[in-house]
Image (cartoon, rainbow, N blue to C red):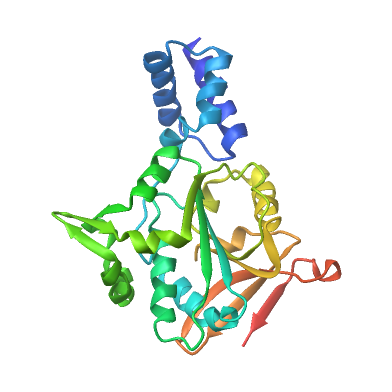
Amino acid sequence: MAGKMIDSLSSAAEKRFGIKTDPGDIKKIQEYLLQTHGGTDPEIIEKVFSSGEAAGFLTVSETYFFREGVHFNLLHDLLPSYEKTGLRLCCAAVASGCEAYSIAMLIESYNRSAVCPINYHIDAFDLNPKVIEAASRGVYSERTLREDGSSFRYMAAPYLEKDEDQYRIREDLKKNIDFFVHNLMDTLPPQEYDIIFFRNAFIYFLPQYRERVLSNLSAVTKEGGYLIMGVAETAGVDHADFREINNLGGKDNYEVFYFYKAKAACESIYSRGIVL
């Protein structure tokens, strides 16, 4: 009976969240259901899964400031294109928020010397309500300032206030960021983003759900907009709306793959493109 319940919960979790599940994590959910909600009735399971309570047992919230610096070099190179139009970004699967704040820090640093400072807004979401709550608070440990993000640390310094052994995000950096809870298996609220960061989360999705996730992201990506994914994830992307770009060097001598959404239906065929 216990084995059947584990299998049932695992199946429900995969259908709800689209991600691979570990038997040990599912066992923790079962224990949580029994201890906190007093049972594993279908109604209770539905409530816990739909509210996001179960997500904390299944998702990885490891993150830090300016993770994968090549993407921030890339973003810096794209910023001049948005001086006149403004920029709306999305951070999908943002965990505890370091990515969203890193982007804001970079744009604020750019704006201090820009002829025409960029108006911008960042929407950031995650499946797990607890990490979104943490992101909104904006309090981080020393561990979130890693060595591989050190070249950008000067951008972070003006916005991190030391509080004993922790760092607190200054309130003025939060004004252009909205954090909310969302499941990537569901359609996103109507919006159009110039750039979407969706990094180091795609690998956790089961193959049968990956196109659905990318379609949900495509629906809110502007024509000609960009999708930026983790450096180890791009090989798994195969979607009609996104074309792959390989930035070979650029002025900062970095190499990174990313994607743009084709501007016309006749161009919406997945193929490789190279920008020199």
Q: Residue at x 65, y 55 (%)?
A: 217
Residue 168, how many percent across, how many down? 26, 56
> Where's residue 248, x and y in %?
55, 84
Q: Quadrant of residue 175?
A: bottom left
Q: Quadrant of the C terminus?
A: bottom right
Q: Quadrant of residue 133?
A: top left
Residue 117 position (above or below residue 55): below
Number of callouts in the render? 0
Specify the farthest residue to the left: 164
Vertical placement of 165 versus 146: above or below?
Answer: above
On the image, the x and y values in percent for residue 157 come to: 26, 71
Q: Residue furthest right?
A: 266
Is 153 on the left or on the right of 47, as rendered?
Answer: left
Taking the image as shown, residue 234 lies to the left or right of residue 178, namely: right
- Is residue 7 at least partly visible in the picture? no
Q: Nearer the viewer, residue 25 or 213?
A: 213
In the picture provided, is 84 more to the left or to the right than 172? Answer: right
State the residue at coordinates (45%, 30%): 53
Residue drawn at point x = 44 percent, y = 74 percent: 107
Query: Can residue 108 be seen by looking at this rendering?
Result: yes
Residue 79 image point, x, y percent? 53, 79
